[in-house]
Image (cartoon, rainbow, N blue to C red):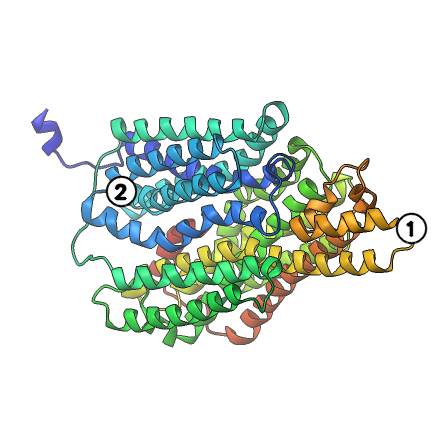
Amino acid sequence: MSDASAAPRTSLPLGTLVAGCLAVCLAQIGLAIPATLNGLFQDHLHPVGSQLTWISDAFLLPMAVLELTFGVLGDLFGRKRLLVGGAALVCAGEVVAATAPGIHQLWAGQALAGLGAAALFPTSLAMIAAGTHTGAQRARAIAVWASSLSTGGFLAPLLGGITGTYGSWRSAFVVVAAVAAVSSLVSLWLAANSRSPESRSLDLGGQITIGVGLFALLYAVVQGPTDGWGSAPVVVAFVIAAVFVGLFVAAERRARSPLLRLDLFRNRSFAIASVVAVVGMFSFLGTAYATSIRLGPIQHQSPMRTSLPFLLLNGITPLLPPLTSRLLHRLPARTLLTAGLALIAAGDFLAAGLDVGDRNLTSLILPLALVGIGFAFTVSSITATAVNTVPLPLAGMASAATNLLRDLGFTLGPAVVGAVALSQAASRVTSSLATSSSLTAPSRAAAHEVLEEGGPLALNSAPASTAPGAARSYALDALGHGYAIGFVVCGSAALFSALLVVTALRGRAAQGSAPQEEDGMERTALTLG
């Protein structure tokens, strides 16, 4: 036994590969599953105002803030512990969510599960990469890891659709909790531990300041439509966000091992790629969120029907890596990046033109196919673009910085789209109620009361037989208008990013040497989370 353990390994242990792939698949399922359940959340929990948006962002926020820190913790204290503990946290969070009697406990469960996912995403990849010994081994292992992540994105809407249709939204969380428990046990029994403590230390100042700053920013953006953009809590939150982002910059300048190397941004090409990482990922997840609200809380379609467009949206990405890999070897990364962003923009603008009363799922095939293909091109090229524009010794830090910014974009997607759409919908339905001649005075008063307390989504869900239910058509029209603008915002952001790449990265991107290209392609898997 001791001789076997002392012998050097020449290949990645199968148990470690299985444990890492199961862990990242689990994390992606946990991230993506609420999209198909938003309609059930609205019907059963009756969230008001921005509360529905927080269900998604409660998971995304800890993931965006803590993912890099968990990567350092794995290097310092052992990755196996984090893989086991992260899955256990996801399991606990899903149980808390499944047993939630109301919206606030559901938030807590989502936040706990997001904390576990923040550990799983970097740790699973680092553990698999550490177990390989050649570039070819690492490329194959990371390809399997990326496929497992994409599989999680594909399984999530299917799982949500089946459990939501034939069980309940609670059943979906129970199933994810069971998968998390299995993942934790598999990691405990099969994964080989690894760590790399050399030159690694925690950046507590950076972590605290970016955590507070990002939470304050999200709070202000999400609560703005409900509380009013000029209300004291929202204004104070924006001020806190600005102050703590400034403190984060100061902390990173002084940190011995910074969470984010600010000197990377002196490289103009890397800075542009970083902006694109935020805005491009915002466009994709904002599109997914707007689609989920359109199909669920607005049109009240079943979770199974809601899941079908997401199978298209998420199912394209796993199919295209062979094509995008060839394209990246033949074209500058900025060319593929521009094309991907342009496709996302085209899909969003098409989606914005759909009538809110159109319940035919075939109407969404072309818009979502364009967004899905564009996203696949974008995630396959954005890290290559960023990594290949910095010196080779900084490539790892460049990839990590891109991941942090990508997750920030993911987190802002639902927040900004929800804020814009609900603000526009509230203004439109209020105006419609004021000018309507077909509503009785009691119906108008009841509609105003529901609108005041729960917002347009609550009015749209009012039973038709009730007094406020007479105004449902106004709410439906207003929500269709609001989320159409949400699609336009996502498309405009993607188009802006495409133009930025074309104008600012001309002749600069994708000029890395051949060794960098392979390393950059391996790190591209990180952007798929």
Numbered disc 1: secondary structure: loop
> Vertical placement of 388 versus 74: above or below?
below
Type of amino acid at the residue the image marks with label 1: Ser
Frontmost residue, 68 versus 318 = 68
Horizontally, is 134 left or right of 140 in the view?
Answer: left
Instruction: Report x, y in % for residue 322.
Output: 51, 45
Residue at screen point 43% across, 75% down: 268
Q: Nearer the viewer, residue 525 or 198?
A: 198
Q: Residue at x 25, y 46 (%)?
A: 74
Which mark is on residue 132?
2
Q: Quadrant of residue 249?
A: bottom left
Q: Circle 1 is placed at which residue position? A: 438
Say whether marks 2 and 1 touch (CB < 8 Å).
Answer: no
Q: Is residue 526 visible?
A: no
Q: Position of residue 386 (x, y in %)?
A: 42, 64
Between 435 and 203, the residue placed more toward the observer is 435
Please identify the residue farthest to the left as the structure is shown. 2
